[in-house]
Image (cartoon, grey):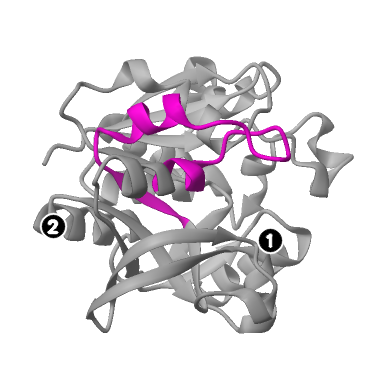
Amino acid sequence: MKIKTVLIPAAGLGTRFLPYTMCVPKEMLPLGNKPAIHYIAEEVVNSGVENMCLIINKDKQLLADYFKPHQELEALLQSRGKISALSPIIELRSKLSISTCEQREPLGLGHAVLMAEKYFGADEFIGIMLPDDIIDGEEAGLKQLIEQARKLNASVIAVQEVPLSAISAYGSIIIKQVINEDLVEISGVIEKPAADKAPSNLAIIGRYVFCPKLFTALHNIKKSASGEYQLTDAMDFMIDHMGERVFAYTIKGKRYDTGTPTGWVDAVNGFALKK
């Protein structure tokens, strides 16, 4: 199993943070002295992957600019003996190759992933990390999935238990069989079900490792009722029409949802307490 590149779908409009996000991407919100996207990039590196592709829209070039060298600033800090202030980003650049891909229309997560198909070979597994989810744990979140995917030679998605009262904000997995206390095979996903309709309290969170057939599935699904191409529909297509097995792994670590103001505040406080 090969996994060389991780996709970071970051073309969203950040409407929950308006008017701030009129000029600054939500992925650049600060957590301590680093923006949220920095922690995502660190997780990629700590998962043993060397390539990261940012899927952005035309107004979010700032995300890519963050990872580029700033020669005048670096020269000035070097001359003043303060270059260590940039050590975290300089170290990241030395370990990670970063590219960008544009999603010109807001047509859903599945569509965003499909825009980056050209970056993958026919036999490459696909890593996907949603930047709203910051996973803080002893082992990198994506690394946990990669290890499972290698053992199973199959697609593995991350889940965590949530109260049934909160399941309507997530995709809820349909369990086909239990492999062990952390791993199940799934037969499908129900998007944002009512609590009394949810097949389980295991909610999909923003980490995925997919087999190469994902792109074939994305080419074959139709738009949802909301007019978007959903990644969960592609998962269902792989299971129902392509004979692919998909597993769900209960990922270890504290998850922060920085896609909402309340979740971002929780993350700020959580990282502050670690200092």
**Of all residues shown, which one is farthest toward the right?**
19
**Quarter of the image containing the N terminus?**
top left
In space, the residues marked 1 and 2 are separated at their CA atoms by: 34 Å
Q: Secondary structure at mark 1?
A: helix
- Identified at 41% across, 34% down, the residue is 7
245 or 133: nearer the eye? 245
Crowd around label 1: few <14 · some 14–19 · many ≥20 (10 Å): many
Q: Which residue is mark 2?
A: 152
**Can residue 35 be spotted in the picture?**
no
* Front tag of 1 and 2: 2
Q: Position of residue 130 (x, y in %)?
A: 51, 47
Q: Secondary structure at mark 2?
A: helix
- Identified at 65% across, 28% down, the residue is 107
Taking 246 as reference, is 269 left or right?
A: right
- Identified at 69% across, 82% down, the residue is 165
Mark 2: amino acid: Leu
Q: Position of residue 157 (x, y in %)?
A: 36, 57
The answer to whether residue 147 is magenta is no
Q: Position of residue 257 (x, y in %)?
A: 61, 61
25 or 228: nearer the eye? 228
**Of all residues shown, which one is farthest toward the front?**
241
Q: Which residue is mark 1?
A: 264
Taking 196 as reference, is 133 left or right?
A: left
Q: Which residues are magenta?
A: 206-235
